[in-house]
Image (cartoon, rainbow, N blue to C red):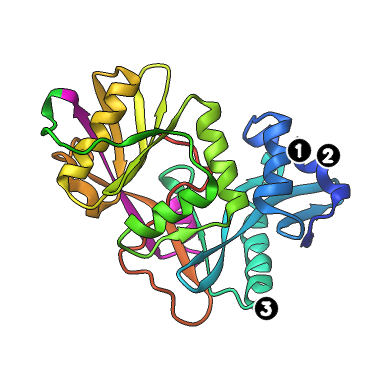
Amino acid sequence: MQYRKATHHDTPALVALWQQVFGDDVGLITNCLQLFAGQGNVYVAQNSQGVCAQLLAVPCNIKECKGFYLYALATNPAVQGQGVMSALMQYAETQFTQSDAQFCALIPANPPLFAFYAKRGYTQQTRLCHFRVYNNELAASPIKPTVGQISPQMFAALRNKHIPAPFMAFDAQRYAMVLDDIEAQGGGTVYCNNGYALFLPTQNDVLIPEIFADDELGMAALLRAVFKQTKAQSLQVTAAPQQAFAAPLGPGGQQPFAMLKPLQGWVPAQNLYIRMALEEFT
């Protein structure tokens, strides 16, 4: 088994493996390979049959600490259970360390994978709160947020201003992909001096995948603006634990979401927040 960085010659095999495991369209896959990860940031395992595993290593940072977000980890079902992904992750992490990266992070796709990654050193978990908010539950607020599309630079500025804890951040190019993904699905942004929120209508619901407000009045104003924009009767909100003052926690309360592995040096991981990493929103 050979472990290496992918080249442009691997693109057809990567697209085929991605579609086999995740089922996404070619356009999204190509954008993720070329833009979200970028040249030199895709790692593969190859056997005599060709590419059989992949991982994308997306450059990111937590404050001044440089790291990589591992995305779209996939193994051909024919070689699953043979330690291929574990070895590929170890190979990539060695490359990260040599480039002075201090951490890597990932978002497990399902609950059993938390144990899989914990055995491989990803022991620092981040958590999110999930709750439902109804329009008639919100307090009145004099704040009038703006509803509309925002630039990646403005999104970065809003996050830097309103997220109180350390968080995983990307550059403008990668934030653009995140915002484009939300807007392509009919979503948008509401913002004011007191905070911001992203909203995403789905077939049967309206999701708030990220919201940060400086106080309860700001939170109420942001949610009211989403209600007005979407005509929804309720919103499914995902928030950092520090933002749980928005409403009583519903069933499930706080749940594990992402995992961090320090590689070298000190990483500010206390109350760490990870979100908006081109993950699936639920």
Secondary structure of residue under mark 1? helix
The residue under label 2 is which amino acid type?
A: Pro
Task: Locate residue 34 relative to residue 170 in the image: left or right.
Answer: right
Of the numbered discs 1 and 3, the one sitting upstream in the chain is 1
On the question of residue 125 being in view, the answer is yes
How far, Cα to Cα, is label 1 from label 3? 28 Å
Q: Position of residue 110 (x, y in %)?
A: 45, 42
Estimate the spatial distance between the alpha carbons at disc 2 and disc 1, rounded to whole Å: 5 Å
Is disc 1 in contact with disc 3, using a CB cutoff of under 8 Å? no
Q: CA distance from mark 3 to mark 2?
A: 29 Å
Density class for disc 1 (Cα within 10 Å; few <14, some 14-19, many ≥20) is some
Q: Which labelled disc corresponds to residue 12? A: 2
**In terms of secondary structure, where does tag 2 sit?**
helix
Q: Is residue 58 left or right of residue 38?
A: left
Q: Nearer the viewer, residue 187 or 262?
A: 187
Identified at 23% across, 55% down, the residue is 242
| Quadrant including the C terminus | top left
- Residue situated in front as seen by the camera: 203 or 178: 178
Q: Is residue 254 left or right of residue 262?
A: left
Q: Position of residue 212 (x, y in %)?
A: 30, 48
- Residue 212 visible? The answer is no
**Residue position for label 1:** 15
Q: Position of residue 222 (x, y in %)?
A: 27, 37
Instruction: Kindly identify which numbered label has been placed on residue 98.
Output: 3
Segment colored magenta: 114-135
Mark 3 nearby-residue class (10 Å; few <14, some 14–19, many ≥20): few
- Amino acid carrying label 1: it is Val
| Vertical relation: 156 (above or below) 133 | below
C-beta proximity under 8 Å, tags 2 and 1: yes
**What residue is drawn where x is 23% and y is 30%?**
224
| Residue 127 lies within the magenta run | yes
Q: Earlier in the sequence, mark 3 or mark 2?
A: 2
